[in-house]
Amino acid sequence: MLYHAGKQYNLKEHGVTGWVSYKKIKYGELPVIERSDGTYMKDCLAISRYLASHLKFMPEDDFENYRCDQITQTFYGLYTGKILPHNFEFNKTK
């Protein structure tokens, strides 16, 4: 998102061993964003929502914003296994 917004950022990539040591120092998980004021943000979904809002990628309309959140939560649930495809109900024609 930062790239598409034309914002400058520093990307720090960690190999497997680097990730383990970095994980212990910070919040216990990656990704982590270190802000210019020295504070850290964690949790991929929360970071994505923050950046989308901050960079004006989210709609201004509250209902459209809700729909974006709904779609994001659904895909996140599918990705993490909290929502399984067989949990969806489909309109079946008789």
Image (spheres, rainbow, N blue to C red):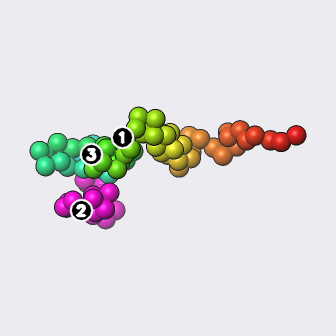
Say what amino acid the circle numbered 2 marks.
Gly
Q: Secondary structure at mark 1?
A: loop
* Quadrant in the rendering for residue 4: bottom left
**Closer to us: mark 1 or mark 2?**
1
What are the residue bounds of the magenta stretch?
Answer: 1-22
Q: Position of residue 85 (x, y in %)?
A: 66, 46
Residue at label 2? 6
Q: Earlier in the sequence, mark 1 or mark 2?
A: 2
Residue 73 visible, this angle: no
Residue at label 3? 54
In the rendered view, tell whether residue 49 sits above or below residue 3: above
Mark 2 is surrounded, within 10 Å at the Cα level, by few (under 14), some (14 to 19) or many (20 or more) other residues, namely few
Q: Earlier in the sequence, mark 3 or mark 2?
A: 2
Residue at image x 24%, y 62%? 6
Q: Position of residue 21 (x, y in %)?
A: 26, 54
Residue at image x 63%, y 43%? 84
Pick the front one: 40 or 21 = 40
Residue at label 1? 60
Q: Mark 1–mark 2 contact, CB under 8 Å? A: no
Say what amino acid the circle numbered 3 marks.
His
